[in-house]
Image: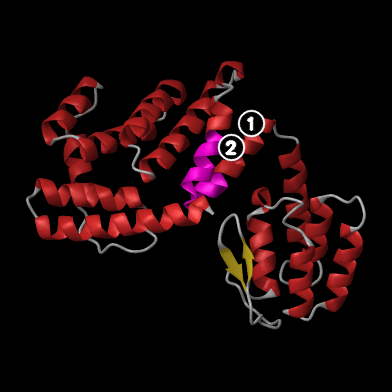
Amino acid sequence: MSKIILCTSREAKTPFVFLNTKVEIYTYEELCFYIFNNTVLISKTTLSDKLVSWIRKELGMDQLADRLTGMLNKTVSAQDILIEILTAGDYYSADEIRDYAAAWQKYRKFSPDHRLKLKADAYLGYRRYIKAATLYDSILDREDEIDDKVFLGNVLHNRAVAAANNLETDDAKAFFLRAYSLNGNEESLREYFYMIAVTSDTATLRGEIRQRGMDDDLFETIMSEIGDSKDDVREMTIFTMLQRAVYNRMNKNMTDYDKRMDIILGELKDDFREQAM
C-alpha cells in the first residue's frame, strides 16, 4: 500500500538514518510513514535518545521529544512509543492508528518463526539480502520442528530469492526446488527455471521444463521475459539484470552483455559494502 507524503512540518537539515535499512528521513511525516510500514524492523533500541534528539533539534517538536524522553526512562513497550509518535500530528487518522495498533497486537500473537519470516521479508524488500538470508536460515535450522510445510516452502522460496540476488545460483536452484516440493506453488518452480536459464544453455532449460511436466510454451515465455528490452534501472534486482545479460550473451550481443555485467559487478560491490555495515 502506498501513500503520498504531504509534508507540512519543518524539514530537517540533517536526516535521521535507520541504519538497518539505510532509509533517510527528513520530516515528521516521513517518520510516521516509515513507522507505519516498517514496524517489524523497528526495535526498542532503534527508539533511542538519538532519535529523540533528532526530533527535538531537527524537527523542532520539543513537546513530543519531552514525552518520548519520559517514556524511554520508563518500562514501556515499543508499540506505546511508536503510537505516541504517530498521534503527535495528523498525518494518519485516528481510525488508521487504531488499525495500526490492532495489526501490532495481531503480529505479537504470531509464532516466533512467523514473526522472524516477516522481518526477513521486510529486509528482502529493502534488498538487504545478507540480513534476510541470515534470518531465513535461522528458521530453516529448525525445519524439522515446523509442521506447516507450506510456510516452510514459502521461507525456502524467499531464501532462494536472497540467494539469487547474491548470485549464489546453485543454492537458489536447490531452494526453489525444495520450496516447490513443500508449497506446491508453481511460482517457485517457475523461478527455478529462470535460474536454469541463467546458469545453463537453452537445451538444458528445455529439457528441465519437459522433465517437470510443463508445456513447451513455457520455454518461449521464459526466453521472451528474459529478453525484455526495457532499460536497466536502479530499482531492478541484480538477478533480473543478470537474466538480461545472459540473454545478450546467448544472442551473441557482447556489447550489451559487457555493459550489463559491469553494472552488475558495480552494484554487487556497493550492496556488499552496505550490507556488511
Asked if the residue under mark 2 is in contact with the one under mark 1, i.e. CB atoms within 8 Å, the reply is yes
Specify whether residue 267 is painted magenta: no
Looking at the image, what colour scheme do you see?
secondary structure
Callout 1 secondary element: helix
Write down the residue under mark 2. 117
**Prevailing secondary structure of the magenta residues:** helix
Q: Position of residue 170 (x, y in %)?
A: 32, 31
**Residue 186 visible from this viewpoint:** no
* Image quadrant occupied by the N terminus: bottom right
- At 60% from the left edge and 73% from the top edge, which residue is drawn? 5
Callout 2 secondary element: helix
- At 43% from the left edge and 41% from the top edge, which residue is drawn? 162
Name the side, left or right, on which 16 lies relative to 155: right
Residue 21: quarter of image: bottom right
- At 15% from the left edge and 29% from the top edge, which residue is drawn? 204
- At 59% from the left edge and 18% from the top edge, which residue is drawn? 147
Q: Position of residue 239 (x, y in %)?
A: 32, 47
Residue 202: quarter of image: top left
Count residues near mark 1 (Cα–Cα under 10 Å), then give few for <14, some for 14-19, many for 20+.
some
Write down the residue under mark 1. 113
Between the C-alphas of marks 1 and 2, the distance is 6 Å
* Image quadrant occupied by the C terminus: bottom right
Q: Position of residue 151 (x, y in %)?
A: 55, 28
Q: Amino acid at mark 2?
A: Lys
Region in magenta:
121-136
